[in-house]
Amino acid sequence: MAGVYGVGGVKKLWISHAWADNSNQSFDYLVQELEETGLEVIYDDVVIPTGQSLWSVIDNTIVWSDIDGLALVVTKASLASHAVQLELDMFVRRLLADYQFPIFGILAEGIDYSEIPSILATRNCVSLESDDWRERIKAGLSGEAATTSRERVHPIFYSIDPLGAVCEFHPRVGSLSSFFVAYDQNEVRGGGASLIGWRAPFSGPRGSAPVSARSFRNAKRINRDGWVIFEVGESLPYGQSAFFEIAPTSTIMRFGGRLATGELKYVEVRRK
């Protein structure tokens, strides 16, 4: 067995899977996508010659060949497959010879962490629900962490209740020195919206207004640049939320406030 895998050549990955998971060619698609990244994907159908012993070839490939990594497509079908369990036993034999050998699970949709076999659960698995699953698998064969881009997180958290009647928002970190809610002036009817109170975000279900509302002495309503703005000149500390009623006719709203740095940050939400 080679001590360094795939040096100077194409990386080779063995993938175990349940045949039932390819009834709609989902496994074929996975192989296709990985091969397009430059990997050589190896599995039972491509290594077993006609007339040869199924298990002796698989055992030799998984345990003794010069592949660069082992993976299992973790699905309900593969977890219930006796054949797949035998292949996982072979994974263990490979690890006994080289504990640093790359082995990981490729997690299908709907798999709970508690269902993942222990040999895979202790390692960093790859979810097919992730947009960069191809890059993660390829990087793993080289012992590298995948370089991924993260979506920028807005400093204001918000949640609207299922009925669309109340919105909650609060700063993710720090506090707001002042905050506001704004509606399109053309859509406001009968007062539009009213700030009704605040509370710690985890003191009750998100999207539910507090039982007793706090009145804001420094709250005021102003019209500016086509918006009706409910502005509160009090701070909204970290760990507390503001709640406001949503006017039934409103399709666009803005809410947020000033961070400790003085920057004005707000979220704009559009409803159909």
Image (cartoon, rainbow, N blue to C red):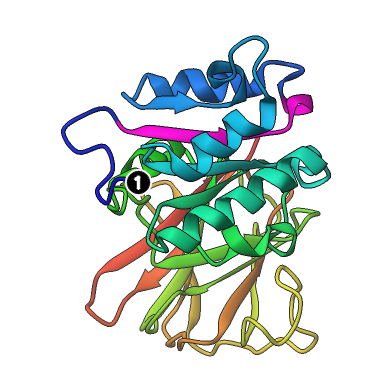
Give the quarter of the image for residue 210. Answer: bottom right
Residue to which mark 1 is pinned: 1
Instruction: Tell me the residue at 77%/89% (across/down).
Output: 212
Q: Where is residue 61 in the image (x, y as percent from the top left)?
A: 50, 34
**In the foreground, 178 or 1:** 1
Q: Where is residue 266 in the image (x, y as percent from the top left)?
A: 40, 60
Start-end of magenta stretch: 11-21
Give the quarter of the image for residue 27. Answer: top right
Residue 229 visible at all: no
Q: Where is residue 114 in the image (x, y as percent from the top left)?
A: 73, 64
Residue 141 visible at all: yes
Q: In which quarter of the image is the C terminus?
A: top right
Secondary structure beneath label 1:
loop
Membership of 146 in magenta stretch: no
Which amino acid type corresponds to the residue marked 1 in the rendered image? Met
Q: Where is residue 11 in the image (x, y as percent from the top left)?
A: 31, 33
